[in-house]
Amino acid sequence: MRPEDILPTYEKVGPAFAAQRNCTLWEKPLLEWLLASAPGPRMLDIGCGGGLPIARYLVDQGAQVTAIDGAHSMVTLCRENVPEATVLQADMRNFELGQRFDGLIAFNSFFHLSPVDQAKAFACFTAHAGPGASLVVTTGPEAGEKVGAVEGEPVYHASLSPADYRALFTKHGWREHAFRPEAPAFHGHTIWQLRKN
């Protein structure tokens, strides 16, 4: 399994994955923080999947949502689920939207990239962040590469060390609000909450 196989895999099994995704909004405290801490209503959902529940919740709270995903099947589904959002097919490693956002979220998407591509993607995140923007991003808890599964298909995951992530964030002008490694309250996900300088 290679990082290059991620988008073809989600193209194939993404709709089935989206249909069984946990949409109980256990992410709600993070989304509330994102909305409350952002300096305005413009939100960018990076790796949006089918749009449920994250893009849907942000729109329902009055946010102006742009959502991107690299898999066409996910873009189609997100447009159906969140018609109020602007949904675009774009690769998170090199997208250029020509605008900046007040809040950004990359939930369970960023860690499908190789370590080298994560650095490229984070530069894109930063290029789309306005002054004082907020960011929520999930990573692995430690450096390494692993293979998981989605709907029976293998999927690649990678992570830097927390120290290397902090160096990356600092390089791009972000400050850490919170780091939650394998947080029980968030189903064991490792979560960073950041603010743009």
Image (cartoon, grey):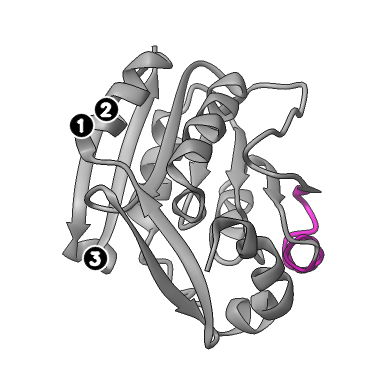
**Nearest to N terminus: mark 2 or mark 3:** 2
Which corner quadrant of the image does residue 135 belong to?
Answer: top left
Q: Seen from this angle, which residue lies furthest bottom?
A: 152
Label 3 packing within 10 angstroms: few (<14), some (14-19), many (20+): few
132 vs 194, left or right, is: right
97 is within the stretch colored magenta: no
The three-letter code of the residue at mark 3 reads Gly
Image spot of residue 125 (x, y percent): 55, 29
Which corner quadrant of the image does residue 74 belong to?
Answer: bottom right
SS label for mark 3: loop
Looking at the rendered image, the quarter that the C terminus falls into is top left
**Magenta span:** 73-86
The three-letter code of the residue at mark 2 reads Arg
- Report, in whole angstroms, how far the alpha carbon at label 2 lies from the one at label 3: 20 Å
Image spot of residue 46 (x, y percent): 59, 45
The residue pinned by badge 3 equals 188
Mark linked to residue 163: 1
SS label for mark 2: helix
The residue pinned by badge 2 equals 166
Asked if 64 appears above or below 142 in the picture, the reply is above
